Amino acid sequence: MAANENLELARWACDQAKRAGAQEARASVSRTRDTSLEYRERKIETLQESTVKGLSLSFYTDGRYSAHRTSDLRRQALEKFIRESVALTKHLTEDPYRRLPEPEYYEGRRDMDLQLFDAAQKQIVADDRHRVAREIEDAALSRGGDKIISVTAGYSESNSESAMVSTNGFEGAQERTNFWCGAEVTAKDDGDKRPEDWWWEGERYRGDLTDAATIGRKAVDRALSRVGADKIPTGEVPVIIENRAAGRILRFYGGAFQARNLQQKRSFLEGKQGEQVASAHLSVFDDPFIVRGQGSRLYDGEGIAARRMPILERGVLQNFYIDTYYGRKLKMRATTGGPSNTVFECDVVKSVDQWMAELGRGILITGFLGGNSNSSTGDFSTGIQGFLFENGKIHQPIAAMNIAGNHLEFWHKLLGMGDDPYRYSSVRSPSLVFDSMVIAGA
């Protein structure tokens, strides 16, 4: 379906909802095509291709709300589906906070090309996809030789288009592409140890991906660097969280910024807007306007016009992620229902090598294992893996250790950041540097 066809169907569905008795309605039409494949031992291990089409509908009538989805897009079938769904809505429990956003939230939408759709994707053929996966695997096997047990190389791409219409004036349509490729590698080690690591890259445009051989070699180098990993004695040392791993600890932190947790008294940041909740070195922004960004958008799932929004400024809490539903409950103005791209600013920025040289001895965390975080109290605990560095240089790999703390204390220990924001995620975190954390080990 082209964008105009998607919009036309969404408009028609909203009109049908009004005819069936809905006071307000929102309709979203989407189509997504996914292709993925994996190679292992120089043979295809998995090959998948799917196309999913659907219509999502939200109905609001007499203070009642319901949401529905169907993949049957025939008009005759949809007429019955919409009529019956609206009738069902009238029997649900009233919720006075459920209604479409006030139209003022739709205003101010930017007119710009975020370059989220690679038109050249339509010219990619199956041989191109297989070639990339084979080159990644070949490069990894050549690099690792008899030091590795296995390599699983993969490639995936997606193409999606969607349109959304609301009965109170919102209309929007968008197209997106995504391309990912990489490898997981298992290496040999003493006894039954089998250290693993990976390297994957994802871009909106296929031409922005690193060449396949480089990706394969990176995956092997990361796995081989884990050989010999072990615990070290418990101690209190500075910590550097690698850019690729930082998203995990940030997601632990992020639950407290959600309006649902705020309204349900499950956020340790409740009542702290305008207060210092992190180091003055830390500023965090929600930025939906990064060209070709993984989380970029012109509007959110409700149609709220996208804006660059400060979350923390020099450690001071500025905003929460608030949709219109919880905004009404909290008596707060809606901002947006969830993050787009999370970006970071800091007044102390150095390379990771410079940080290690300055700190002398500490832990470089390259991955988190399991763990949990309590959004009510701020307490968190998680396993880690990475490297001990001494005299400013990597000394040995470490594994099976643990870090724990409380977010209200932890983020005050931030000393600065690396110069390496991670580009393959909507969380574009650089490496994060913290002072004196207790690392539990042997």
Image (cartoon, helix red, strand yellow):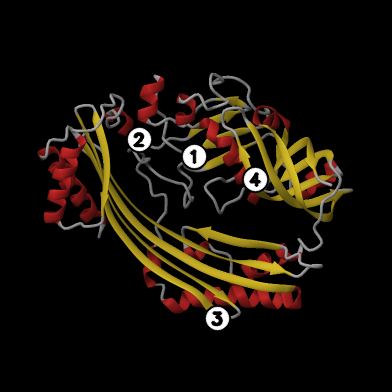
Which residue is tagged 2?
Answer: 304
The answer to which image quadrant residue 263 occupies is top left
Neighbour tally class for label 3: few under 14, some 14-19, many 20 plus, Cα within 10 Å: few
Neighbour tally class for label 2: few under 14, some 14-19, many 20 plus, Cα within 10 Å: many
Q: Which mark is residue 43?
A: 3
Amino acid identity at mark 4: Pro
Residue at 47% over, 35% down: 308
Question: In the rendered structure, which disc, 3 or 4, sits on the residue that comes first in sequence?
Answer: 3
Which residue is tagged 4?
Answer: 430
Q: Nearer the viewer, mark 3 or mark 2?
A: 3
The answer to which image quadrant residue 181 occupies is bottom right
Question: In the rendered structure, which disc, 3 or 1, sits on the residue that comes first in sequence?
Answer: 3
Query: 227 or 215: nearer the eye?
Result: 227
Distance between mark 4 and mark 2 Cα atoms: 28 Å
- Measured as percent of width and height from the top left, residue 287 is found at 49, 39
Which residue is tagged 1?
Answer: 287
Amino acid identity at mark 2: Ile
Question: In the rendered structure, which disc, 2 or 1, sits on the residue that comes first in sequence?
Answer: 1
Amino acid identity at mark 3: Lys
Neighbour tally class for label 4: few under 14, some 14-19, many 20 plus, Cα within 10 Å: many
Name above or below for residue 182 compared with residue 85.
below
